Image (cartoon, rainbow, N blue to C red):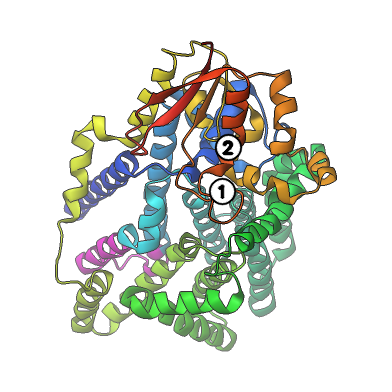
Amino acid sequence: MKTIKLIAQYIYYLLVLLIYLSRAAHWGFSHDENQFIAAGQLLSDHGLFPYVNYPYTHMPYGALFFAITARISNYDYLAGRVLNAVACVVCCLLIVYIFKLFVGTRYTVALLIWEFVIVFIFLNHPSMVLIAGEVLNHSLASLFSLLALMFFIHFVQQRYSPDWAAFGCGVCVCLATFIRFNYASLIVVLFFLFWMYKWILNPPRFLKSFQSFIAGLLTAALPALVLIFLAPYSFYYGNLVYTRLNTLYYQELHFKMNMDLGSKISGFLSNTVSSPLNFILYALLVFVGITSFVLFIRKKSPTDLNILAVATFAFTLFLTAFAPTPTQQQYFFAPVPFLVIILAIVGSEIYRINKPVFYILILGMLIALNPKPDVTNPLDELKYLSNPSQWTPLQVHDFAEEIKGYVPKGRILTLIPMIPLEAGYDIYPFTVTGPFSWRTSLLLSSQGRARYDVISPKELAALLNQYPPDGILTGFEAPNAGFTNDDPGTVETPFIDYANNNGYRPIILPASFVQRPITLWVKGP
C-alpha cells in the first residue's frame, strides 16, 4: 500500500508541475514581468546591481534568482517563467509537508485524498491563478516564508537541533523579506512567537536558539545591507519614495478603486462574500486563530503554538495586502498558502472525529472552489505544452532575434528592456523598471531626481545625446496609462519624439505576444 501511495503522489505532482509549466508557457505577456527578468539579466550579463547601478522599485533578492536562470539559458524569459512554475510546485510540496508535521504518522488513504484536494485547491485558487503564469516575485517570497514556518515548527517540535532550526527560520524569513517587502512583517511575528514559546514553555537553552535566529536574519541580510550601504538614497527611493509617488500618480489619473482604507476593505469584503472558497478560508482563519491562542495559553501545548503560528502568518500577510495604494487583487495571494494549511489541519481533525463529515467536507470544498455547474477537465491546460509556437516566452524570444535583422548590435532604448537583453543588446539601465519609475519621474523635483539618480523625460535628451541608441522600440505601452489622465501610451512619446528629431525611421514589426505591432526605430534614411 505504501508503494501505491508513493506512485500516486509522484504521478499527481508531476501533473501539477506540468500544469504550472503549461501556464508559464501560454500565459499572456505582461509589462509587470520586465522589471524582474531585466534586473536578473543585467546582473548575469553585465554585473549591474539594483540600487547601485540603477534605480529599482522592488527588494533586490529576486534579481539574484532571475540572474541564475538568465545565466543557464539563452531563453531568459522562458527560464524565468519556468523558475516561477517550479517555485509554485515547491510551495505545494511545502504546504503538504507542513500539514504532515501536524498529522504525524496517522496518514491513511483518506488523508492522501485530502492532500490531493488541498493541492488542487491551492493550484486553482483565484489568487494563485493570477500569479502562476507570470514572472513575479510572489511565488519566491511565499516559498521562503513557508520554509521559515517549517523551520519554526521544527524548532518547537524539537525534531532536529533547535539552534539550526532557529537559524534556518531566520535565513528564510529574511530571504522572503528581501524578495517582497511586505514579508518583513513576518520577522515581527516570529519575534512574537519565539517570545510566546519562551514565556509559556520556558525551555532550556532558549537564548542560544534565539541568538541563532537573529544570526540567520543577519546572515541572509548581509548582501542587501551591502547594497543599502553603497546606495542608501536609491534604496530609500525604490522602497519608500516610489510607493508614495505611485499613489500620487494614480490620484492624478482620477483612479477611484482601492485608494483608501474604506474602499480597500469594501473591495475585499465584496470579493470574499462572492467567493465561497475565500469566505470559508477566512472564516477558518478567524476561528482557528482565536481557538489556537486560547488553547495554547490554557494547555501550553507546542502543537497549539504551531497552529497559532500558521494563523498568525496568514493574518499578518493578509493585513499587509492593504498597505499598497492602490491595493491589487494579487496582493491577497500572500496569505493563501497558510490559509490552505489551516484548511488542511481542520480537515484532518474532522477526519479523526467524524469520517462521513470529512467526505462531505471534501465535496463541499470542491464545490466552493468552482460553484458553477460547468465543470471543466483540469488537465485541459496541458494541451498548450504540445504547441511551442504558441508559447508566449518563445514568441518574445523570436521577436528579440528578429530585431537583429535590422539592428545587428548596439544599444536599444525601450521600456521593456528584457526583450533586447534576451537578444544580447545593451540597454539603458534606467529602463529596468519599465514604465513604472519612468511614468512617476516627473512627480519628483529636479533635485529629487538628481538625488535618487532618476531619469525623467527632462533628462532624456541629454542622456541620449551622450549615448545615442542604435535602435528604439515603442508600442508596448500603447494601451496603458500615460503620464496624465486620458492619454494612454504617452509614456513612450519622449522616445518617439527623440526618434523623429534625430533621423530615425520607423519599421513596423508584428508582435503576436501583445497582439499589436511594435515600432522599431532605426538610424538612416
> Can residue 69 be found in the magenta stretch?
no
Q: Which residue is mark 2?
A: 493
Q: Secondary structure at mark 1?
A: loop
x and y percentages locating residue 54 in the rendered image: 70, 34
Q: What mark, if any, has residue 410 been given in the picture?
A: none
In-image side of 294 versus 519 (left or right):
right
Q: How many labels sit on residues?
A: 2
Quick check: 289 above or below 419?
below
* Disc 1 to disc 2, C-alpha distance: 9 Å
Quick check: 125 above or below 278?
above
In the image shown, does 395 or 278 lie closer to the viewer?
395
Q: Which residue is mark 1?
A: 482
Quick check: 499 above or below 36?
above
Circle 2: residue type: Thr
x and y percentages locating residue 98 in the rendered image: 43, 61
Q: Is residue 168 visible?
A: yes
